[in-house]
Amino acid sequence: MKSLILVITIVLIKFNTFGQPGSGLKSYDPSLLEEECTIGVANGTATSDNRPLLWKTRDYSSAPDNEVKYNTSNPIKFISVSNAGTSTYPWMGVNERGFAILNSLSTDLEQASSGPGNGEVMEYALGNCRTVAEFQNYLDATNITGRQTHANFAVIDTTGVAAIFETGGNDYWKYDAANSPNGYVVRTNFALNGGGDGGIERYDRSRILINNFYSGDSLNYKSILRHQMRDFSDFDSEPVPVPYPHIWIPGRPYGYIYCNVSICRPSSVSAAVFHGVLPTELAGYTTMWTILGQPASSIAVPYWPVGNTPEEADGPVTSPLCDKSLEIRGKLFDYYENTNYIDSYKLLNGLGGGLWTCIFPFEDEIFTDVNLFMDTIRTKSPLPAATLLSKESEIATSVLAKLQDCYYWQFVGIGENEQDNVIDVYPNPFGNEINISYNLTERSFIIIDVFSITGKKIETVFNGYQNAGDYSYRINSENSLYPNGLYLLNIRMDGRSQTYKMVKINGKD
């Protein structure tokens, strides 16, 4: 195998901050930081295709291994995102009658001392309820007996009802999307009736994003998956660009985003958007678009509540899809002094490369394929369950293969295979010169370019074929082309590309 490997030791240097959003830090109860979710619901009057939507980014770092399971142990069968292993509690799911439910923790509501908890409530609802009205009847009954719940439950059904219930131990408050100004409701980790403000930054950001989708007639599952669930923002709920060409606060590495107040968070372990049906369509066509793993590091797959989910989503022990996403996640959140930071330049490097250039075009192909697929079968009756299951298995298999491919080419193909010889770039940080040396094990086509942080090419170090052997170059950075600051070294070998950061300090400026 042809190999070109780059090892760079990055030295963290304190810079003066510039252009940084939200430099202030707020205090939180550490015990609640990991279990925070962002949810929402919209009825057909708000969406671009008149079908209801329900969505959730699940934040719970204590349970990073999530699976998509098919539950047949209740009167009504359902699929759900659950913890890997033997757990049956659903944290978002839809049943064969087209009733879907999910939740977010709301600790400002008072729970009862006994009765079903959040997971038990949702398992009962998916296994027994056909409509939102039936779920509300269940809440009425358990108001009397009590629930160990402090949650916002969001629900949709095939009649078009979409609502969020703020639910305590003996009380609940219903927020019907039909009664909201624009037909949608969002929540994070507080209840309007509870008086708290948990996740207020994500709540404000979610309202901005969903309103933008609504105003542009683009409130659909694709917009939510791509732009809401992969969104980074600051303490003022303002968007943070990817890549992020700044230092967040002094002492942090360049280009890393603090994302603990973003919708896309360090503790995010899965996400789902439920694409409902019109009242004239069969319930089984309700689609649960699911990202297993950290949303920035994986690809959405559609599932339908008609049978066993593929092994890629529900493996013997854990989900292979989730496993691969977690492996990719480890490369993104690699600032070990504070794991709330993500390396934005690994997502998009500003030069046409990065993880998202690998996974997003493939996800777009899936969106297009499934749209055409659904257009051809939505009018079919009875429900073609075998066709639906074959489609989700086909997509799950292709997504796992794509994630493996993206992982290799983005993180292993160049730069991290310790068995191969290496390229050294030294010193880094550098002063008035920088040295590049490497060994090729086979003849390869090599392009080595240096770019400014804005993407302007500074110079080409080499462009052409090289035989196997040792090579070295010295770049004179004393000239005016290299003022103090950050530079990007882009290595391309036979079509593969990887970009690395270099810092110049203490040279002539």
Image (cartoon, rainbow, N blue to C red):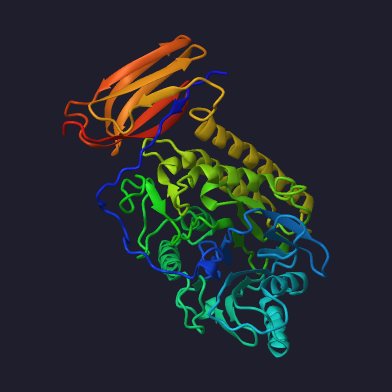
Position of 327 with respect to 88 (left or right) is: left
Quadrant (top left/top right/bottom left/bottom right) for the C terminus: top left
- Residue drawn at x 58%, y 66% as measured from the top left: 54
Q: Is residue 494 visible?
A: yes
In this view, the residue farthest toward the bottom is 144
Position of 444 with respect to 371 (left or right) is: left
- Residue drawn at x 22%, y 30% as measured from the top left: 482
Decide which of 263, 397 is in the foreground and name it: 263
Q: Is residue 51 above or below residue 128?
A: above
Q: Is residue 377 above or below residue 213?
A: above
Residue 476 % position (x, y) = 23, 22
> In the picture, residue 92 is in which quadrant?
bottom right
Q: Is residue 282 visible?
A: no
- Residue drawn at x 46%, y 54% as measured from the top left: 340
Residue 273 % position (x, y) = 58, 60
- Residue drawn at x 51%, y 38% as measured from the top left: 358
Residue 96 % position (x, y) = 75, 64
Decide which of 204, 182 is in the foreground and name it: 204
Residue 237 % position (x, y) = 38, 64
Decide which of 175, 429 is in the foreground and name it: 429
Quadrant (top left/top right/bottom left/bottom right) for the N terminus: top right
